[in-house]
Every structure is written in structure tokens, then in C-alpha cells.
Amino acid sequence: MIKELSDLGKILREQKTENEWVHDALKEEPISMEVVITEDGNFKKFELFEKKTTIAEAITAKKGKARLLLDKAEEVLCYGGDASRKKHELFREKLDKYCELPELAPVESFYKQNKVNGVDKALNEFETAIPDEKNRKGNMGFRIQSEGSRVHEKPAVLGKIREKYEAEQKKFLEKSQKNCSVCGKTDYPVEDIPHGMIKKVPDGQSSGCALVSYNENAFESYDLIGNSNSSICTNCAKTYVEGLNWLLSSGNESIKKNKKGKEKKEFRYTNRKNFGSDTAMVFWTRKNEKVNEIDYLEEPDSADVARLIESVASGTERDSRYLEADQFYSCTLSGSAARIAVRDWIETSLFDFRKSIAQWFQDIAIDEYDADSKNTQTHYARLYDLARCCQRKNSDGSYDKDDASLARVATYLWNAALKNTLPPLWILTRVLQRSCLDGVTADRAALIKLILNRHTKGGDFVITEKIVEGDRPVAYVCGQIFAKLESIQYAALGKVNAGIRERYFTYAMTSPASAFGRLFNLNSKHFTKLKGEKPGLAVNLDKELQELCKDVDIRRFPATFSLEQQGQFAIGYYHQRQKQFIPKNLDKTEGE
Ligand SMILES: [Zn+2]
């Protein structure tokens, strides 16, 4: 995984134009103000602007370090008094190391010869110039009044940073030549230095998290110290950090209209999907090319899905396999304080990836009644909604945020979609529990279908998208009968507070023999009432019920249903209900 992340980082570097920007010694950093000074170090003013980016010295971790000429007010001005003293000293020490550069003379004068009209004056005016406390937190860099570029961006300064960095690397390499565990080469040294922080990790700390970090003796062995245990060279460390940071943050803002037609700015990640507050999946291909199929998981469009399934089935995909050697990667990450927990790592060929996505849509496809066309249509659930199927709800109907199942289920479903794997059976248990409480929705039926079909290894009953006629398992028929009994109750009593679904669904799904005994007794009462009021409808519904009962021996219902049978029961119930939604010409019989 680290090798692939590092390769991605290298590709990203190649895509950048200016050479300096990709040197290991330098890094892009945000800047939000300039300290404008004269040639002889007199403070002139602070120039504030919307956060921009600049190129500056790369430092891997902030603690105990200062960046050359670009930092926060604490470091640059000793803003904050004694508490900032140490930071300011580090900043000044760094400056001293570069004092031979004539470009730095005005800054040196700002701190030394011209101290009163320099740094002292700047510190005094800092608060007045920037009245809003939150604007004082950004990075500041120096600019000479008569010049356009900032001091830290001057070619001589950047050149010196690179020179020092390379000299340092050389020193290390001379000391110990070790093969890097990622690139296998000895071009760069393996050092005990932090690898750089990964930002925007879900539920991680805002300053960033470490993917590789050895900070306790217990993690060390063979006399290696700290990060030298990982045997990752400085170049690979930088590139994997850049690769992962890019995956977690790249995207663009687009204008989206909400339901009320109001326009809203929305940030869309290009290589990341979030599930719950603590989990995100990032994905990419070796050549860093866009894969549209990933978006289908989020917003399935019947035409796209049909085209994909068709191209995989017809072999047009297969034929191009040998030409297309690109690989698809994905990792699932969660923050855990200062570290990153890697929950899943997926590596597959682009060909197998497309095949899996096509299979995924075939497995989750389920008929759903559509009120507009007054008929059933194929429903493709969003992966997010499938993961949501198992989440607990509060009494007011909202989702319970404390229920971590969304992210856990999503991790398995993501893997199942991309690698055609089996989601674990505990997800089936969870979704059946939710179905008993809140009903069998199209999304829940899709999830049940997916798990059941992937767990039956041929021979057994395979659930189809449409209602199954003819030979089908007893549990499936029981679910259909239950739906029919429910509709008879509805026809007789109208909407009741707790109908048979609320009261008997779990019972019927787990202990059919005893539950259906009670249900049939109840039904004869509903039927008698309905017969008195709407005899035509009563006869029709009863006929449909008898049709279903013919397919099973109702005197020999099993005492219990297994987990798999419970799933079949729920699907039978769901399919039957969708069928019942389709309007029939009942007007005539109803009037009789
Ligand atoms: Zn390396």
C-alpha cells in the first residue's frame, strides 16, 4: 500500500511544472499575510490577503522546528510573550544558519540593528493591524517594500535550502547505506525523522495523523531507532505522504441546487468517499486516471449500469484486458488520535474491478413499485443507503449517530462491491432486525438479496430481482402469505396503529408454525368483516391468499426459520408487497 501511495506521489510530482516545487527540501505552504519592511529593516505594514499558497522549506513535523522565513506570529514576532519565546528562538536560530545570504540582510536588520523600528514596532502594531483574533493565526512571510517577491521565495534562498538538504542527505548516506523497503534503492537515506503528517483524516486530529510512526521503545528492534525501523527512505516517505494527502483532499467546489431550488456551494472529493464521521475510502489507479464506475456506487443510473453490465458480459471489456494494465487501489482509513487505522486495503486490476462493479449491480438489483409508471422498476440502491440500512434510529425517526454500524457495514460493502467478496452474515442479522422494526424497504431488500445470493454457492435458491413464481422455498412463500394477510387486514380495518407487521413480523419470520396459527385465526375475523362490507374484494383477496397457500403445506410450517430462511421470508414479503401495489381493476368487483 505504501509503495502504491509513494508511486502516486511521484506521478503527482511529475505532473507539476516547476522543478523547485517538487524538490524534497521544499513544500507548498499556505500564507495569509506579509510583513512589509524596508531595505534597512524598518517595519512598514502588514499586508493581509485571502489565504494563498507559497513555496517554502519543507519541515516534516512542527514540534521543535521552525521554517525558514515563513511561520506564524508566535515564531516570527514572538507574539504571545513568554509562551512563544522558545518558538521564536528556534525561528531566529534557523535564520542565523542562513545569515551568509545577502538576501536576508534586511530581515537580519529588522531583528537586530533596527530592532526598535523593526520587530518591536511590528509586534506593537500586530494587534491593531489585525483586529480579528482568528486572522492572526496564519503564516506570515517577509517582503521588501520595493520588491514584488517575498524573501523566502527568492531563487537564492530556495537554492540554499536545497543545497543544505542535499548535504545533509549525503552525510546520512555516507554513514549508512541501507536499501529502502519501498523502492528497494539506496539513492536516499533511511532516517529516524517523522514522515510528515496526513491531513483531513476522518476523526483524526486537525494537525494531522501519522501513517508510519515508531514513538515507543516497544516498537523498536535490531537496534534501530524510531522511524528507521520502517526502512523507508526519505524520498519514499515524502512521496507516500504527498500521495495520501492528495487523495484525502483533492476535489473541486461545485454549485448544487437543493430541494427548494436554492444554490449551494458543495465540495466534491474526486478520490474519496466518506462513511459516517470516522471512516473514509480513498481510491485511485496506478496511472491516476479517473474511474467513472466508482460514481455509479454513489449515484446509480440505470443506463450507465446497463451499459457496464453489457460491456462486461459481451466481452468488450475482456478483450481490452491485455492492453489495459492499469491497477485499481483503495484503502479505508479511520483516524485514531494522532494515528491512522487502515481498515481495508484493496488492490485489483481495472478489468476485475469493472467486472465486480457489474456483478454488484446485478446482486443488488431489486424490483420496486414506481407510482409514476404504476408498475415495478429496477431499483439500484446507493452504496451509502445500503450501509445506512443497518443503522439504529432514534424515537423521532432520525438516525442514531452513536451507532457506528454505518461505517463498519460500509467498509464491508465497499470491499464487496470492488472485489466481489462475501459480506459477513452479521450484516444480514442487523438488516433483518431493522426490517422488523421499520419495515422492509427497497434498500433493505437489496442488501438481504445481495448477502443471501453471495452466500449460496450454487444449487440453492437464488433470489431474483423480480418476484419468484413456481418452485420456491417455504420461507419465501410464508413471506408472501404474510404480505397478503396484511393487505386483508388493511382492507378490513384501514390503517391501524399497530398492524400485523408491527406485531407479528418478527414472530412469523422466526417461529412460523405457531405465528401463522395465530395469524390465520386473526385473518378469519378480518375476512368475515370485509365480506360483510366489500364482498367482491373479500373474495378476490381470499382467492389470492388460497393461491399462495397452495404452494406450501400450511399444516406443516416449520417450527423455526434459520437466518438464511429469515432473509428469504423478508424478500418474499417484500416482492409480494411490490406486486400488490400495482393497481388492478378492482372497481367493478368492489362495487358488487
Ligand atoms: Zn525509497
Image (spheres, rainbow, N blue to C red):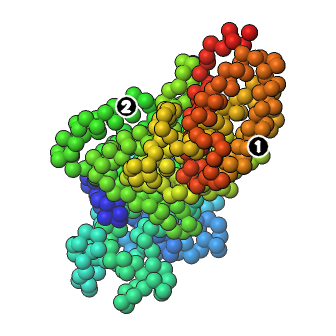
C-alpha separation, residue under disc 1 versus residue under disc 2: 45 Å
Report x, y in % for residue 497: 82, 35
Which disc number belongs to residue 330?
none
Q: Mark yes or no: residue 429 visible.
A: yes
* Secondary element at image label 2: helix
Residue displayed at 28% across by 52% down: 349
- Tell me the quarter of the image containing the N terminus: bottom left
What residue is shown with label 2?
306
Q: Nearer the viewer, mark 1 or mark 2?
A: 1
Amino acid carrying label 2: it is: Ala
Q: Is residue 141 above or below residue 264?
A: below
Residue 480 vs residue 352, the one in the foreground = 480
Amino acid carrying label 1: it is: Arg
What residue is shown with label 1?
518
Residue 463 vs residue 55, the one in the foreground = 463
Residue displayed at 23% across by 38% down: 315
